[in-house]
Image (cartoon, rainbow, N blue to C red):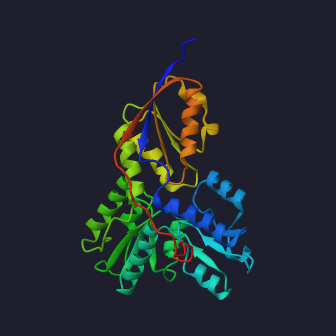
Amino acid sequence: MDRRKLQIRLAAPRGFCAGVDRAIQIVEEALGKWGAPVYVRHEIVHNQHVVSRLESLGAVFVEELEECPPDRPVVFSAHGVPKAVPAEAERRNLVYVDATCPLVSKVHVEAERHHRSGKEIVLIGHAGHPEVIGTMGQLPEGAIALIETEDDARQFEPKDAANVAFVTQTTLSVDDTASIVSILQERFPGIATPHKEDICYATTNRQEAVKAMADGCDLFLVIGAETSSNSKRLVEVAKRAGARDSRLVASASNVDWDWFEGVSTLGLTAGASAPEDLVQGLIAACRARFDIEVEHVTTANETVTFKLPRVLAAEV
């Protein structure tokens, strides 16, 4: 029986970024150095498949520091933590390793610099996201105002309009953020901007790849978790860039094959915390049902890597 043809446009770059790679490696190296269990405050990255694999190696995921025993090391997640968390770890004499992505740490440093210079700080981001909680927790309560939408940007009233600065979450929609920034710059022409774009290279690159290939796709699938901000943004970007339909799936087992009715071209990518084996698993599931042809769409080559924290770096 002839099987229906399906062209798959496969985005590159996709999947793990340098910050996610580093965070996972930190947990693995901590297990190698100290043995199991190693405690991890919050999901190390927003992907249940990654979390489950690390659990099988001996990682124990907890919500708060108080759940960690005094005699075992603890790792802080890639999203960053409020200043109070390492302070509490030190008070309890816990051995801890901070797996905060260096590009998130850069935003923390920026916010502190603006605060020291007396500026009122605006954070563009999503309320409740761990990265936003971590960034806002770098400074005293009330020092940072959160802006989520263009309406928020229009309604924000600083104490001194001539003394405002903004920083952003690293995983936002590039286009949405640009719209919010332009409103802020129109209202506050002197607003201090980041030295270098806060939205990270990986978020930007994955969105650009999707933009380059979404038009003409009958269906666009993004592999990622519901809790993953950058993955959800990719779904939105695909729809805006011309995909007829776009959806977020955790893995091939979450695909509803009824979605493929009338689909001849599928776009496929993965968020920055989704492992490549999930992508290959979805391609294999398509191969089992269709006569597939995979077209690789590459819009950037990523060579960024981040060093491990000194406490885990190989001893010379």
Q: Name the outermost residue toward the left.
A: 189
Snapshot quadrant of residue 289: top right
Q: Give residue 78's quadrant in the image.
A: bottom right
* 111 to 172, vertically: above or below: below
- Name the foreground residue: 16 vs 226: 16
Tell me how many marks there are: 0
Question: Does 20 appear above or below 262?
Answer: below
Q: Is residue 136 left or right of residue 32?
A: left
* Residue 92 drawn at (x, y percent): 68, 86
Q: Residue at x 62, y 86 (%)?
A: 90
* Residue pictured at 39% horizontal, 67% vertical: 155
Query: Residue 295, how many percent across, how many down?
Result: 41, 32
Q: Position of residue 280 (x, y in %)?
A: 55, 39
Asked if residue 79 lies left or right of residue 9, the reply is right
Residue sticking out furthest to the top? 1
User: Foreground residue, 111 or 191?
Assistant: 111
> Compared with residue 68, is residue 129 higher up or lower down, i.e. above or below?
above
Residue pictured at 40% horizontal, 72% vertical: 122
Tell me if residue 227 can be seen: yes
**Which quarter of the figure is the N terminus placed in?**
top right
Q: Is residue 173 in sight in this rendering?
A: no
Q: Relative to residue 113, is residue 183 depicted above or below?
A: above
Q: Residue at x 39, y 49 (%)?
A: 207
The image shows residue 198 at horizontal and vertical percentages of: 38, 65
